[in-house]
Image (cartoon, rainbow, N blue to C red):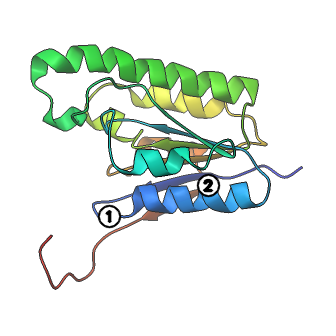
Amino acid sequence: MDKKPVHIFCGEGKGKTTAALGQGIRAASQGQSVIIIQFLKGSYTEDINFIQRLEPEIKLFRFEKSEIPFEELPEELRKEEVQNIRNGLNFAKKVMVTEECDVLILDEVLGLLQYDIATPDELKNLLMARNRDMELILTGIDDGRELWDYVDVVTKLSTVYKSVEE
């Protein structure tokens, strides 16, 4: 079997998670199993209830306990969330080693570099743990350039024109 690709969706523009989820829906529609692990988003957003309706084909995991996104947390609450996030990274490695899915989406995992929650070497080791039969998708604002030797496709999303403020 051919090696499945590793993708990065990055950039300041909106749509990174949407692009990754689209890849996951495409895979699920072809009978593949998909696991999404989200980082840095807090424990609640509106999309979680919808995505959970796609189970068992697409399974969503979040390890953060706070409803507030990581970037908005006060410093004293960040320490606890860092451990929760690291638990998510450990779970991602377990999913890769045990081959629990065909497609693994690590949403906002590249942000862990920005916040010094994970090092480039830790993410490289995570990528190297991947079975070649598993498609892997990473997202984040950061382009993850340190990981490019282990990646097949990097797609940068950016806003070219916007006529209204959000």
Looking at the image, residue 86 lies above or below residue 61: above
Which residue type carries mark 2?
Gly
Query: Which label belongs to residue 14?
Result: 1
Q: Is residue 97 left or right of residue 70?
A: right
Neighbours of disc 2 within 10 Å: few (<14), some (14-19), many (20+): many
Please tell me whether mark 2 sits on a helix, a strand or a loop: helix
Which residue type carries mark 1?
Lys
Neighbours of disc 1 within 10 Å: few (<14), some (14-19), many (20+): few
Please tell me whether mark 1 sits on a helix, a strand or a loop: loop
Whole-percent x and y of residue 45? 32, 45
Whole-percent x and y of residue 22? 56, 62
Q: Is residue 71 left or right of residue 97?
A: left
Depth check, front residue: 106 or 34: 34
Query: Which label belongs to residue 129?
Result: none
Which residue is farthest right?
1
Q: Are marks 2 and 1 in contact (CB under 8 Å)?
A: no
Q: Which residue is mark 2?
A: 24
Residue 165 position by quadrant: bottom left
Return the disc, 2 or 1, that comes first in the chain's sequence.
1
The residue depicted at 60 percent of the width and 24 percent of the height is 93
Looking at the image, residue 72 lies above or below residue 159: above
